[in-house]
Amino acid sequence: MKSLKKKIMIPVFLLSIIGTLILSFFVYNKSKDIIINYVERLAQSKAEKLASHVEHNIEKWKSTVNMLASMDVAKNMDYEGFKEYLYNHEELYDKQCELFFINDIKGDYVSLNGAKGNVADREYFREATNSGNTTVSEPIISRITGNYIIVVAAPIKDDNGNVIGLVGVDVNLPAITDIIDDEKLGIGGYAYMLSKKGIFIAHPNENLIYKHNILNDKNKDTVDLGEKMINGDIGIKYYEDNGIKKIASYMPIKSTGWSIGMTADYNEETNSILILRNYMLLIGIGTMILILVLLNYLTNTLVKPINNLKKHMEIATKGDLSVQCDIDSKDEIGVLSKSFNKLIKENKRLLEEAIEYDRLKTEFFSNISHELKTPLNIIFSTTQLLPLYTKNDNENFEVTKINKHINIMKQNCYRLLRLVNNLIDITKIDSGFTELNLQNKNIVEIIENITLSTVEYAKSKSRTIIFDTDVEEKITAFDPEQMERVILNLISNAIKFTKPNDEIQVKICDGLDNIIISVQDTGIGIPKEKQEMIFERFRQVDHLLHRRHEGSGIGLSLVKSLIEMHDGKIFVKSEYKKGTEFIIELPIKTIVEEDDVYIVNDFSEKSNIEKINIEFSDIYE
C-alpha cells in the first residue's frame, strides 16, 4: 500500500519541479530580453555618441577653413601671409589635420609645405566652387603626401560674393580612426565608418581603409549591413561573420552622408545571459533540494500526527475504548483528534449505558418476575388452604380465617393490578399517547382530601399523617386523577419506608407563580450518592431495601413523568436514617373551559378506598 507521505510528496514535488521550470523559463527569457534590449540600447547609444563626436570634428574643421577663407590674406591670395598666420596660430592644428592649402579659381594650389599643383579635377573643388558652400570630400589619395585623406574645403569669396578660390585642409583617414576608437562595444568590439559609396573611411584594420568596399564583401549579411548604412538607416543588425555571431549598431553622419558602425561579438555582449542561465540552473537545483527537504519535513510534520491518530484508531477498533489521542495542535488534525477523542468517549459512554441498560433490563425482569410471582404464590397458597376450611366434614370451620385469606388474595390482586396499570401507563407516556385531562380546580382542597383519605390506613400501620397548608385556595389547571396517583404513590412510599410511630407530613406552600407540595417522612432516608437514581425506571435504592420492601421500581419514574407533563418538577431531599422529603413545584396556570363551573371531586375515604388499596397493595407488615 502506498504510504500517505509518498502520496503527498511525489505530486507536490513534481508540481514544484514543473512550477520551478516554468518560472525559470519565464525569468530566463524575460531576463534575456532585458539584457539584449540593454545591449541594443547601449550599442545604439554608443553609435549615436560616436556619430555626434565625428559630426563635432567635421564642424570644427569646417569652421576652421571658413574662418581662414574669410581672411584678407586668403582673398588676396597672399600665400606668405596665409602661411605666416597659420604658423602663428598653431591652435588651429589638431592631430587629424595633415596639411592646409590654398588655391585659386583655376585650381592651382600651394600647400603649407610649399608643394604646388592643380586640383581642378577634384570633385570637392568643383562642388565647392559651383555651390559656394563648404564641402567635405569622399576619401581620396593626397597628391602631396600620397596618404589616404578627406578634404574639407571652403570657398574664398570676393566682396561681391563670387568664388575666387578655396581654402582646404587634408584630414588623414587613419587619424579619423583614432577619433572613433574612443568608443567601443565590449572588449573585442570596434567602430568603423563608411563613405557614401561604402568605402571604409575608418577601421581598426588600416589595410581596409580606402582599399575595401563593404558592398564587395563575400558575406551577404555584411553586404546587407553596408547597404543599410549607405542608405542612412539607423538600427541594430545581427549577423554571422566567419561562423561568429555579431551584433552591429549603425548611425548616419548627416552632414556628410557617411555612416558610423559599431560591431561586437554577440556572445561576449550577452555573456551575462549565459552566466544568468548557469546561476538559474544552480538556483533551480538548490531550490529543488530545498523544496525536497522542506517537503519531507512538512510531510513528516503532517503525517506523524495522522499516523498517531491511525494507531489510536486501530487500538479503538480492537475494543479498547479507554484510548485517547494526545495530539494537541490547533489545526484540522488537532480538531480531528479532539473529535476522535470525543467520539471514543461518547462510544464508551454509549457502551457503558448499553451494558447498564442490559443490566437494568435483567434486573427489571427479575423484579417483575418477583412482583408477579409473590402475589401469585400467595393467591395460589390461599386457594389451596380454602378447601380445607370448606369441607363438609370440617367441624372447626372458622369464618374469620376464611375472610383473612380472602383479604390476602384481594390485596395481592390489587398489587397485580397496580403493577399492570403502572406498566401500561409508563408505556403510554413513552409512546406519547397519554394526555392530561386538565381542569381549573382548587389544588389545595384536592390534595387535602387525598391526604385525609389515607389517614385511617396510615393509623392502621401505626403511622401518623399530618396535612398543613399556608393557603386555603389555589385555582390552577391540573389533572385531578393523575395528581391523585402522584400523592398516593408518595404517601405509599413514605408508609413503606418508615417505622411504626413515625410521622408523615404533607405540606402545601404558596409561591409567587407556583405552588409547592411537600411529602416528608421521618423514615430510613436515602443515601446521598443514591438520590439521583431513585427517579430512574426500574431502579431501587439498594438490595437491602429491595428485599425488605416490595416494589417494581417504576412508581417514582411514573410520578416524575406525570409531574413533568404538568410542566412541573420534582426533587428529593434526604438524610440517611433521618428521613426523606419529596418536593413538587407546579406552575400556576389556568385554561379556558367550556363549562366554567367549579366542581370538587369527592375524595372521601369511602369513594377513594379502592384506589388506596391499589396504591398501597405492596405494603406488607
Image: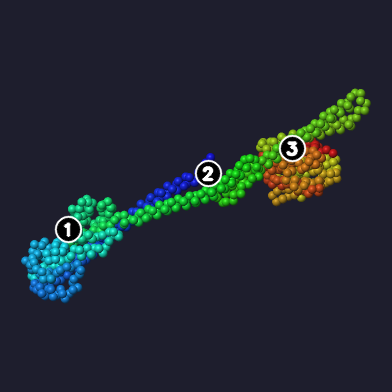
Where residue 551 appears, as percent x and y from the top left, is 78, 38
Amino acid at the residue labelled 1? Lys
Does label 2 or label 1 sit earlier along the sequence? Answer: 2
The reply to whether residue 34 is in sight is no
The CA span between labels 2 and 1 is 78 Å
Location of residue 394 (image quadrant): top right
Q: Amino acid at mark 3?
A: Glu
- Counting residues from the start of the chain, the first of labels 1 and 3 encountered is 1
Which residue position holds label 3?
A: 363
**What residue sits 57% from the left and 51% below the top?**
329
Separation of marks 1 and 3 at Cα, in angstroms: 127 Å
Residue at image position (33%, 54%) is: 33
- Residue annotated with mark 2: 4
Q: Residues within 10 Å of mark 3 (few under 14, many from 20)?
A: some
In depth, the one of 404 and 158 nearer the eye is 158
Q: On the image, numbered disc 1 is attached to which residue?
A: 211
Could you tell me how far apart the alpha carbons at marks 3 and 2 are, in whole angstroms?
50 Å
Amino acid at the residue labelled 2: Leu
Q: Which label was assigned to residue 220?
A: none
The local secondary structure at tag 1 comes to: loop
Q: Secondary structure at mark 2?
A: helix
162 vs 377, nearest the viewer:
162
Q: Is residue 73 above or below residue 289?
A: below
Secondary structure found at label 3: helix
